Image (cartoon, coloured by chain):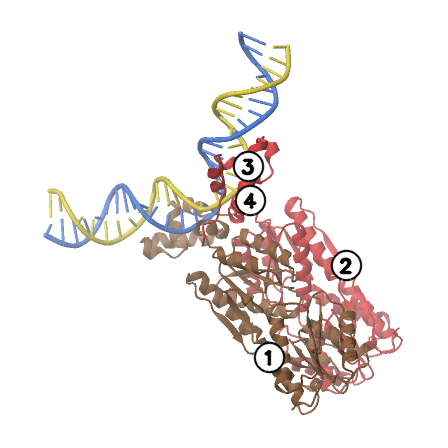
Chain colours: A brown, B red, C yellow, D blue
DNA sequence: GTTTTCTTGTTAAACGATTAAGCATATATT
DNA sequence: AATATATGCTTAATCGTTTAACAAGAAAAC
């Protein structure tokens, strides 16, 4: 490793103290009353010598790393990848670096990541929390590390969060199916008590209820684990059809569920939307190419990413303790898969 | 911010020097001849006080951040997102943290990211280099910062790299089209001199040449900029059809080109594979859902990610200067879109 | 001609760790 | 008994910055 040039090297070369160099290079000449000419000399030699500040040293001294951690479920999931990209861009606007990490919905991995990032002295966290990670979140809070939850949050915890309005989005989507004439709407969701999933289920249930479609004692909902396979979804759909053979529509709670679900429907020889209409959460390039382009709920990823960063940075710079809780509306993109009277 | 507990706090609490605490907590008791009992006491109080080492301080002292930068074109592109995930996982196996960043194929952004990451004292880089970033790469080399290029590399630069065998993959894919009976095969590529793209073009050209299909003076290739729109691709396809109205197959050079290209083909009312057969590079969930499931080139993302990390870490720990240059084969996944005699 | 006030700098401690070197004391070797 | 070796722990410098506190000469004020 070529010896990197430090502030000391510059000081030596110019013939001044390191303090002066530091002041100049941090644009504190005014406050530190540095002479105009010498300042210029310092700046010139710094450039000449190719000086690059050592952020590690800076961080150690200032206690700020200008870095924050973004923990999602899986960076290879397009939903999170897009969110991450928006977070990255907004962070750059504030001169922050973000460290991504994937926790795979596992509280164990999540705790491990939080530890690693904490040791790296991140200035804050943006987290899509895994199930049963409340204690981890609380401990971040207790340590006064700025935090914004994203995509989901915990009802019982007082935190910042930025989510989409899952309840409304679901309610609208299912209502749309009902208006399109469907009378037996099933739902495929994740088996979890995370609030975003519960809200999506509530939205589904309430839409049915408000439209007097809640006939059966057991709702037409099947859930699968996070590490589900296509077979799991297929089994779920079959069970739903067994439970109510006249099921004529399906509401999928996420993009990954939908992708596997569509393949399952193909396997089962169900035509969309004639046999079974489909509406789902999230986007996917694939939805455009399905023979019956999907009607889907488009989450406000750009706004979610931007806001999460802005709230986090505000929390880092101000040290006030007021929590911002944002629920941003989603948009229903209506296409063919939901059947009749769409425009 | 709650005062974090430092090694000094532990030392004070136990009544020993910080040196002893450091030795114990770094499992250097043997070398440093630390007493057994006191070592246990130190460990216990450390745990009790909830000590978390300050990696920043550690890094400053040791000169190693145990961090490396991964610069790709766009983390929201599934190709890079998947690669990134594999890199992340392999890095974790070595206890390294990775900082992702997107350069959008822009040398300016790339330089900016390299600077930022260098200042953050990353121990190395994995980079999918943008066009015209040779000087940046050279400068990393000159500074003796370990580096592995990925996805593409520069012929004129002696570096580590891990890529897929773009030439072979292209050659095979196009040969497959030829064997399937197609006689006028066009190609849509990016307008760039990056080696991966040139190799893909060479593979295409040579496959044609070797099968005596190179009749026209100007090859049936159209290129678009990195920031292309669907209209650009559509225009390209139209031009190709104008140039040779009997074009019966298209080879797309990347996933994003394909996605827009398929929509363009739909717009142009071209049926796949009857009017125009299609083969493409990269995967996409969408390819499964196209009415004629696509034949595509599956890149070895897992192996590429793993190898890149391994090579980088080897370069970080050993300081030897031998370059590892890996070209890993891709697999052609044959489905319907390429027309006849596929199984 | 002092004293005060600017101007322009320097000194040195600190951030939280690591680690070579040193210093006792105890035990072993001859 | 004298010396060598082991054992157990401390001291203090260092990594590259930041920044409060201080200093010294020049200009201004009286």
Q: Viewer-proximal residue, A244 or C18?
A: A244
Task: Name the residue carrying label 4.
Answer: B47
Q: CA distance from mark 1 to mark 3?
A: 56 Å
Q: Quadrant of the C terminus of chain A?
A: bottom right
Chain of the residue under label 2: B
Q: Viewer-proximal residue, C1 or B258?
A: B258
Residue at left offset 65%, top offset 57%: B88
Quarter where residue A219 is shown: bottom right
Find residue B95 and report its horizontal and vertical position in percent: 63, 50
Instruction: Say whether residue A152 is left or right of residue B6.
Output: right
Q: CA distance from mark 1 to mark 2?
A: 45 Å
Q: CA distance from mark 3 to mark 2?
A: 52 Å
Q: Viewer-proximal residue, A8 or B191?
A: A8
Q: Which one is in front in this view, the residue at disc 1 or the one at disc 3?
A: 3
Q: Which one is in front in this view, the residue at disc 1 or the one at disc 2?
A: 1
Q: Which mark is residue B41?
A: 3
The secondary element bearing badge 2 is classed as: strand
Chain of the residue under label 3: B
Earlier in the chain: of badge 3 and badge 2, it is 3
Find residue A27 and report its horizontal and vertical position in percent: 38, 57
Instruction: Say whether residue B172 is left or right of residue A139.
Output: right
């Amino acid at each position: 490793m070529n010896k990197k040039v430090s502030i000391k090297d510059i000081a030596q070369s110019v013939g001044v103290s390191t303090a002066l160099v530091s002041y100049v290079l941090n644009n504190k000449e005014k406050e530190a009353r540095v002479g105009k000419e010498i300042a210029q000399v310092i700046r010139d030699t710094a450039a000449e010598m190719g000086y690059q500040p050592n952020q590690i040293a800076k961080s150690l001294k200032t206690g700020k790393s200008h870095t924050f951690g973004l923990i999602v479920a899986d960076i290879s999931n397009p939903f999170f990848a897009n969110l991450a990209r928006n977070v990255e861009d907004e962070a750059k606007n504030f001169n922050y670096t973000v460290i991504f990490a994937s926790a795979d919905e596992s509280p164990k991995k999540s705790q491990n990541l939080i530890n690693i990032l904490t040791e790296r002295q991140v200035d804050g966290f943006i987290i899509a929390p895994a199930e049963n990670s409340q204690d981890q979140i609380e401990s971040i809070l207790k340590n006064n590390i700025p935090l914004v939850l994203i995509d989901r949050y915990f009802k019982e915890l007082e935190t910042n969060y930025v989510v989409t309005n899952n309840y409304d989005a679901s309610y609208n989507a299912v209502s749309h199916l009902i208006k399109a004439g469907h009378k037996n709407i099933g739902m495929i969701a994740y088996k979890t008590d995370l609030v975003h999933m519960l809200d999506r289920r509530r939205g589904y249930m309430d839409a049915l209820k408000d439209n007097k479609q809640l006939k059966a004692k057991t709702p037409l909902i099947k859930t699968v684990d996070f590490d589900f396979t296509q077979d799991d979804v297929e089994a779920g759909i079959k069970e739903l059809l067994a439970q109510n053979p006249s099921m004529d529509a399906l509401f999928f709670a996420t993009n990954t569920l939908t992708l596997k679900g569509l393949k399952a429907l193909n396997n089962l020889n169900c035509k969309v939307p004639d046999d079974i209409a489909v509406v789902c959460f999230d986007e996917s390039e694939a939805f455009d190419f399905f023979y019956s382009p999907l009607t889907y709920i488009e989450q406000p990823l750009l706004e979610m990413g931007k806001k999460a960063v802005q709230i986090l940075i505000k929390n880092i710079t101000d040290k006030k303790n007021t929590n911002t809780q944002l629920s941003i509306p989603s948009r229903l993109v209506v296409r063919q898969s939901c059947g009749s009277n769409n425009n």
